Amino acid sequence: MGDGFSEIEQNAWGGFLGTHARMNRMIEEDLQSHSQITHVEFEVLLRLSWNENHRVRIQDLAAESVITRSGVSRVVERLEKAGLVTREEASEDRRGAYAVLTEKGLTRFQQAIRAHVAFVRENFLSYYNEQELEQMAGFWKRLQEC
């Protein structure tokens, strides 16, 4: 192991990276096939749907996402052109803006989420039993709390 990783570390980290890349490709293809949206567009719609008012500051979307603030702004712009979100100026801070889920966006998201949940169950969750899923959830929580 000339790269500094032990064999078990290499298998754990390399397995994560490979699985992440493969799952992202599969998710992208699946979302495009049934909902004609990208994975990052789906993520923005998902985060907006989780908010009680379906309204989130763009900078907060970026903070919770793997893409940059300018990347989130571009995604919001695409979703706005499609009529799935609107952009509202932040009254408390003129420099900020909110992304707001429209009725059309909520409908599109609700259709996409049903197919997405089925996809995730079939292609990921079904490979693990309840105890393994609880353990995995604990792993992710531990990392999020760092």
Image: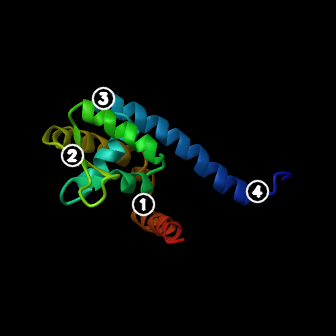
Q: Nearer the viewer, mark 3 or mark 2?
A: 2
Instruction: Name the one closer to the observer, 100 or 129.
Output: 100
Query: What residue lies at 20% left-to-right and 44% top-to-bottom?
Result: 110
The amino acid marked with disc number 3 is: Gln
Q: Nearer the viewer, mark 3 or mark 4?
A: 3
| Mark 2 vs 4, N-terminal side | 4
**Residue 45 vs residue 10: left or right?**
left
Instruction: Name the one closer to the observer, 109 or 73.
Output: 73
Residue behind mark 4: 7
Gap between marks 3 and 4 measured at Cα: 41 Å
Gap between marks 2 and 4 measured at Cα: 46 Å
Q: Nearer the viewer, mark 2 or mark 4?
A: 2
The amino acid marked with disc number 2 is: Leu
Which quadrant does the C terminus fall into?
A: bottom right
As drawn, 2 above or below 38: below
**Residue 30 vs residue 17: left or right?**
left
| Mark 1 vs 2, N-terminal side | 2
Q: Secondary structure at mark 3?
A: loop
Q: Position of residue 18 (x, y in %)?
A: 60, 44
Q: Residue furthest front?
A: 94
As drawn, 127 above or below 74: below
The amino acid marked with disc number 4 is: Glu
Residue behind mark 1: 129
Mark linked to residue 36: 3
Q: Secondary structure at mark 4?
A: helix
Gap between marks 1 and 2 measured at Cα: 35 Å
Say few, some or many: other residues with alpha carbon within 10 Å of mark 3 (under 14 / 14 to 19 / 20 or more). some
Gap between marks 3 and 2 measured at Cα: 17 Å
Q: Quadrant of residue 10?
A: bottom right
Q: Nearer the viewer, mark 1 or mark 3?
A: 3
Residue behind mark 2: 101
